[in-house]
Amino acid sequence: MTPDCRKITPTEMTSNWTLPGGRVELGEDPFDAVIREVAEETGCDAVVDRLLGVDSRVIPAALARAGVEHQNVGIFYRVRITGSQLRPEPNGEIAESVWTAISDVAGLRRSSLVDIGLALAQTLPATGHVAPVPVGGLIQH
């Protein structure tokens, strides 16, 4: 099972399931950022088990929150939850944090990041790269 977070974007006011994550702060190591983001968005303490891979994609302006085309570089880690109580992010975009069975993820309206993370976790490619994930239907940006 994986912790999934449902984020509500201000422009849509609809929810998408996604994985915990966010920006790497200036001067912050991505390894430390994932631990911080998991704690902020789920309330859980975590340790990094391994690097899964890196995804790089251009988000078209029409799909981007700010309405401006940008490049997104995602660094995916497998983490292990070590403690604390699962909860949504206080005063943040996370509406709900729940444990979801991997078998149930396919039926969720979800961010494409979920499918990228699952593909990396399931295949563990030596290069850390998976084929682009199509966006549409249940999978959103």
Image: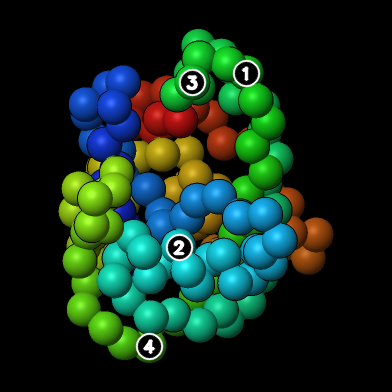
Residue in the image at 21% along x and 26% along y: 13
Q: CA distance from mark 1 to mark 2?
A: 24 Å
* Residue found 46% across the figure and 30% down from its top: 141
**Number of other residues with Cα within 10 Å of mark 3, as a class: few under 14, some 14 to 19, many 20 or more:** few
Q: Which of 140 and 23 lies nearest the eye of the viewer? A: 23
Left/right of residue 67 with respect to residue 84 in the rendered view:
right
Disc on res. 69: 1
Q: Nearer the viewer, mark 4 or mark 3?
A: 3
Residue type pointed to by label 1: Glu
Residue pointed to by mark 4: 82
Decide: few, some or many residues near mark 1? Use Cα within 10 Å; few <14, some 14-19, many ≥20.
Answer: some
Residue placed under numbered mark 2 in the picture: 37
Say which label, 3 or 2, has the lower sequence index.
2
Residue ID for mark 3: 66
Q: Nearer the viewer, mark 4 or mark 2?
A: 2
- Above or below, 31 against 24 in this view is below
The residues bearing labels 1 and 3 have C-alpha atoms spaced at a distance of 8 Å
State whether residue 101 appears in this view: no
Question: What's the residue type where badge 2 is placed?
Answer: Glu
Residue 80 found in image quarter: bottom left
Q: 45 or 138, which lies in front?
A: 45
Alpha carbon of mark 3 to alpha carbon of mark 2: how far?
21 Å
Secondary structure under badge 2? helix
